[in-house]
Image: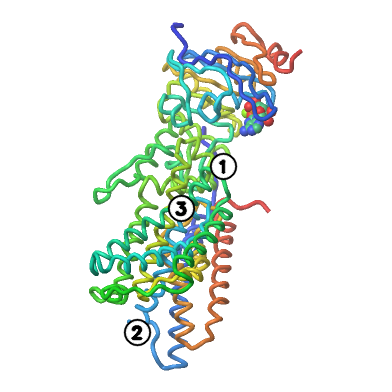
Amino acid sequence: MRSSPILEVRDLSKRFGGVHALEKVSLDLYGGEVLALAGDNGAGKSTLIKTISGVHKPDEGIISYDGKPVTFENPQQARDHGIETIYQDLALADNLDVGANVFLGREVMKRILGLPAVDRKRMRAEAADTLKVLDIRINRLDLPLRSLSGGQRQAVAIGRAIHWKAKVLIMDEPTAALGVPEQRKVKALVRSLKQSGVGVIFISHNLVDIFEVCDRIIVLRRGIIAGERSISNTNPDEIVRLMVGG
Amino acid sequence: MDTLPVTEVDTDRISWLTWLAAARAWLFLGILFVAFEVWAQLVYRTTFLFNPFNVQSIAVFAVAPLLLALGQTLVIISGGIDLSVGFTMGFAAVVFAHCVNGTLDALGVFGSLLVGIIVALVASIVPGLINGLLIARLKVPPFIGTLGMYGVARGIAFLLAGGTTVPVRNSILAGLGNGSLFGFPIIVLVTIIIVAVMHFVLLQSRYGQHVYAIGGSRQASLRAGINVERNTIVLYVLSAVCAAIGGILYTARFSAGAAQAGEPLLLDSIAAVVIGGASLFGGSGTIIGTVIGALIIAVIQYGLVFVNVEPFWQFVAVGVVIVISVLVDQSQKRLGGGKVDEE
Ligand SMILES: Nc1ncnc2c1ncn2[C@@H]1O[C@H](COP(=O)(O)OP(=O)(O)OP(=O)(O)O)[C@@H](O)[C@H]1O
Ligand SMILES: [Mg+2]
């Protein structure tokens, strides 16, 4: 099954002023695998995935996608290549409805008197279809997101990422706000994406979740890679030791 | 059941409260008309509302503040503010007047008007573009950036005007500025067309959708791949061009360009946007709301003159309406089941 990785990161470094958020981090991600990123708060997990998704520009290092080196000037370019990201802070526009958020930056257009106009009805309907896959119900699709619950908002962020049939899906703590049944749905979703060949980067503080859905795990500690293990050859105790640096 | 909890809310109460909030600008307008009508009937035994002359005067009165408020609406929805519109309007008025005068002999009445309009519109792009670049690229807060442009445009407008008003020598301009077509004042018709265009842009175009998104969350917009920088620059250019159209219509109406033409209109324009339901924090607002807001201000100003009240009361009245309209918005949020601010 292993051909060549869909995503290769080599010696990536990112500094914020004096803070070394990432120091020479390398990783490979293959299609059809789920790679976990673990680490303490502030270890650099979010910085790593934001650097991959085009939010941050790396200070050093190379990112290759499908075998070719790429530099994403902005998240749009990463998305155009088929890399979708669920951000830890969700990155939703709370004044807009579910449809507008799922299609943010990629609005579906129709014609009114020959002029291009956003097709809100269709965006709502398609967004509802996507959320159905997650089995998440939102009673009013035309309400602004600010009136939804934390879990419903997280569901919208997940829905937005999976709607676009990405080849690489990055999930930064996707289940943090979800109830137990919804967490199960998300894990089932990750498994089915994996079946269909998507490469998934899964960030979580929940080692049970990680051991349930991931194939491999990379542990970050203060911006460097503290270790990389195949899930079948490790256990939670070892991962915790790597995280805290024992 | 594997579904997210659905919040149970009293939908009946929501619907009439949101309706009230959405309709509050209309209600205000209605109440004002009724109040002035009653006043006029009781005190002067005459009608206020059913006199076409009054209605027409109010519409003409509303033209300039409304044009400033149209661009301002988009700017405020995006989370910004444009303090420079008043003097951009004055600057465009003076440029227009000079151009029409300067080209009259060479190009005739029509040619000089056309050139004047084009030059004034193009000239207004400059302050808009500078505002946009300062705010979008150099990250200057909109309040500060446009306050700077307020000063610059003011100074340049007065310099160009030589410290006085610039009378226009063009025989057809006054006809355009004060004439009617199918019974409607021409400047009102022009304004209606621009309102329609702006309404469509904001509500239907992808650009308008992105303006709302940027006002809702700049960061979410960036992550979604929206070109926030370019959108923001276009916003301030649009605002300046709307102001310039206001300046051109002003000059047509009074046959003279004046640097101070828009000076008292800046706050009216912001008030119209806020009364129309926009939040100064960005993310909400509509063109229709702004139109109603501008009409409310015009009715107050014209109506108080009509019933012979000291004109200074208009400032009090407009101020009270602004505060009431924001209070209604707040209580709608608190009672209506939408997201309530934490205390
Ligand atoms: N935009 C930023 N500007 C400055 N410093 C930043 C920025 N983003 C992250 N950092 C710093 O980089 C380091 C890594 O942060 P990061 O958010 O990547 O951690 P994390 O592993 O995702 O943590 P958590 O588990 O809490 O989400 C921290 O020290 C943080 O303060
Ligand atoms: Mg993080």
User: Would you identify the image quadrant in which residue A178 lies?
Assistant: top right
Residue A160 sits above or below residue A64 on the image: below
Same chain letter for marks 2 and 3:
yes
> Which mark lies nearer to you, 2 or 1?
2
Residue toward you, A57 or B12: A57
Mark 1 crowd level (few <14, some 14–19, many ≥20, 10 Å Cα)? some
Give the residue number, with chain letter if any, for mark 1.
Answer: A149
Q: Residue at x 47, y 93 (%)?
A: B43
Give the residue number, with chain letter if any, for mark 2.
Answer: B51
Residue toward you, B82 or B270: B82
User: Disc number at residue B236?
Assistant: 3
The answer to whether A207 appears left or right of A106 in the picture is right
Residue toward you, A108 or B1: A108
Q: Position of residue A181 (x, y in %)?
A: 56, 29
Q: Residue at x 52, y 13 (%)?
A: A28
- Rounded to the nearest angstrom, the CA distance separating label 1 from label 3 is 35 Å
Residue B190 sits above or below residue A84 on the image: below
Which label's residue is closer to the chain start, 2 or 3?
Answer: 2
Query: On what subunit does the disc labeled 3 rest?
Result: B
Residue B321 sits above or below residue A130 on the image: below
> Which mark lies nearer to you, 2 or 3?
3
**Element type at mark 3:** helix
Q: Look at the image and tell me in which quarter the C terminus of chain B lies.
A: bottom right
Q: Residue at x 61, y 9 (%)?
A: A229
**Element type at mark 2:** loop
Same chain letter for marks 1 and 3:
no
Do we see residue B150 in this rendering?
yes
Task: Tell me the kind of residue under disc 3.
Answer: Tyr
Q: Position of residue B211 (x, y in %)?
A: 45, 48
Query: On what subunit does the disc labeled 2 rest?
Result: B
User: Would you identify the image quadrant in which residue A167 lies?
Assistant: top left
